[in-house]
């Protein structure tokens, strides 16, 4: 992965502007942790009422579609997709 986690966290913020993520300056390790935690919450649909939640596969499809249709750089897109795949594999274990 060539993009830094700080850059990817900013790219994620760009895609999901309504997500309340910390505004403080984070180092690479903190950025990585926050990014992985946030993507896991997104894929598990934890921000939605339990009766309205969608399956992780559905949320994964929506996330990948949103990333691919964004104006991010190709490297940012690939890196974010790679992270989503990793998180999805962890969820499915």
Image (spheres, rainbow, N blue to C red):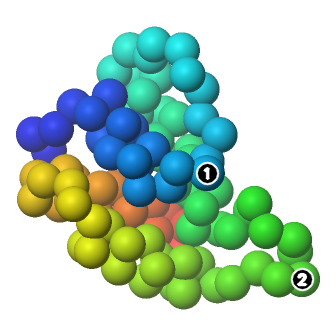
Name the element at disc 1: loop
Of the two numbered discs 1 and 2 on the same chain, state the one appearing first in sequence.
1
In the displayed structure, does residue 51 sit left or right of residue 44?
Answer: right
At a point 69% along the width and 84% down the height, the residue shown is 54
Asked if one can make out residue 43 in the rendered structure from this viewpoint, the answer is yes
Residue 84: horizontal and vertical position, in percent? 38, 62
The residue under the point 22% across, 60% down is 71
Q: Which residue is drawn at 46% across and 80% down?
A: 62
Depth check, mark 1 against mark 2: the one in front is: 1
Residue 75 picture location, percent across and down: 11, 52
Question: Along the horizontal axis of the image, is 14 left or right of 22?
Answer: left
Q: Residue 51 carries which label?
A: 2
Using the rendered image of the protein, determine whether residue 85 is visible from the camera's viewpoint: no
The relative height of residue 77 versus residue 10 in the rendered view (above or below) is below
Q: Please rate how many residues cluster around mark 1, counting C-alpha atoms within 10 Å: few if below 14, some from 14 to 19, many from 20.
A: few
Residue 79 image label? none
| Few, some or many residues within 10 Å of mark 2 (<14, 14–19, 20+) | few
Q: Looking at the rendered structure, which numbered label has been put on residue 18?
A: 1
Residue at 87% x, 74% y is 50
Percent coordinates x, y for residue 82 in the rendering: 26, 60
């Amino acid at each position: 992965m060539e993009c830094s986690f700080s850059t990817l966290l900013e790219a994620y913020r760009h895609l999901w502007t309504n997500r309340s993520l910390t505004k403080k300056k984070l180092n690479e390790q903190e950025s990585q942790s926050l990014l992985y935690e946030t993507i896991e919450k997104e894929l598990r649909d934890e921000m939605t009422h339990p009766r309205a939640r969608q399956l992780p596969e559905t949320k994964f499809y929506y996330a990948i579609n949103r990333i691919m249709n964004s104006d991010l750089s190709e490297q940012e897109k690939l890196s974010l997709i790679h992270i989503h795949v990793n998180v999805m594999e962890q969820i499915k274990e």
